[in-house]
């Protein structure tokens, strides 16, 4: 009996430790803060938009060193930093070479994997958070978080051609709520295909229910807008997602597809 009790208590302790570790890891994603966990620099669209219609940029604008085609890259990177990095503001700032190496280390981790415990994370000394580091060292981060062109040929993008019904969007809405409730983040691909008014990726990090409303409102990090969060809405009456209007997008209904939630997604 004594041996049995000891075995039981040992097993219970191990289970409890595992649950606590999982809870602590999930809390890292749950505590995502726009003004701490995003980049200060922005992604620029390849085309200029007016009322949702794309136009070629003027030659003077095209000649600029614009940071373009990186909305997928930046949302994925924000997710990866949140899960796999930690910051040490009291340490000495890293050289460009070492900073770049550590950024690439974080980028090589699959974004759908669980958050790492604090002691296993890649350390970035000299800065309190990603927001501060990206303001001080934008060139190093832009160079090392990834190229934009491969996102055009991602296998997961092809869902927009055949998974276009209302039922798929309802499933996405249910999955989104479940992930946020579990403390995870959700990278969303927004499209209006076959119209080309938006073809974009954002990071959804918080759900909020408004009083007397059947709709769900979500706060998102949009790489095109480094200044403040933006809003995505699930319209219960329309059974669809609606994205906030801005200078690039006329606003209105969009289809949402999760990306970076699993391999090949």
Image (spheres, rainbow, N blue to C red):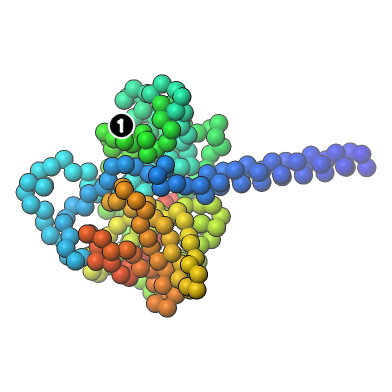
List the residue tagged with mark 1.
Answer: 137
Above or below, 221 against 106 in this view is below
Name the spot of residue 244 as percent of width and height, x first: 32, 63
Instruction: Give the camera-side residue of 80 and 30.
Output: 30
Looking at the image, the residue that sits furthest to the front is 211
The picture places residue 98, in percent across and down from the top left corner, at 36, 24
Residue 237's quadrant in the figure? bottom left
Which quadrant of the figure contains the N terminus?
top right
152 or 29: nearer the eye? 29
Label 1 element class:
loop
Estimate the x, y position of residue 224 in percent, counting from the top left.
Answer: 28, 51
Q: Residue at x 45, y 71 (%)?
A: 215
How many numbered callouts?
Answer: 1
- Residue drawn at x 7%, y 52% is 58
As drawn, which residue projects farthest toward the left?
59
Q: Residues within 10 Å of mark 1 (few under 14, many from 20)?
A: few
Residue 134 picture quarter: top left
For the question of whether residue 97 can be seen, the reply is yes
Q: Is residue 144 visible?
A: no
Residue at (22, 49) in percent of width and height? 44
């Amino acid at each position: 009996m004594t041996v049995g009790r000891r075995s039981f208590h040992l097993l219970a302790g191990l289970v409890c430790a595992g649950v606590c570790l999982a809870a602590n890891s999930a809390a890292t994603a749950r505590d995502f803060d726009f003004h701490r966990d995003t980049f200060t620099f922005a992604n620029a669209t390849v085309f200029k938009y007016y009322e949702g219609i794309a136009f070629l940029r003027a030659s003077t604008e095209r000649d600029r060193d614009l940071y373009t085609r990186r909305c997928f890259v930046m949302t994925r990177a924000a997710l990866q930093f949140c899960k796999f990095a930690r910051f040490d503001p009291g340490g000495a700032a890293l050289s460009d070479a070492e900073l770049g190496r550590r950024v690439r280390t974080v980028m090589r981790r699959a974004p759908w994997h669980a958050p790492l415990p604090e002691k296993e994370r890649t350390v970035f000394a000299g800065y309190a958070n990603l927001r501060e580091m990206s303001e001080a060292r934008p060139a190093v981060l832009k160079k090392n978080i990834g190229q934009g062109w491969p996102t055009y040929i991602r296998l997961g993008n092809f869902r927009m051609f055949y998974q276009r019904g209302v039922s798929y969007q309802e499933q996405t809405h249910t999955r989104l709520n479940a992930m946020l409730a579990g403390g995870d983040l959700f990278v969303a691909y927004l499209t209006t295909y076959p119209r080309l008014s938006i073809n974009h990726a954002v990071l959804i990090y918080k759900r909020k229910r408004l009083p007397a409303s059947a709709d769900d409102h979500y706060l998102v990090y949009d790489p095109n807008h480094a200044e403040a969060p933006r809003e995505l809405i699930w319209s219960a009456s329309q059974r669809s997602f609606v994205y906030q209007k801005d200078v690039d997008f006329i606003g209105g209904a969009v289809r949402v597809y999760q990306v970076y939630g699993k391999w090949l997604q």
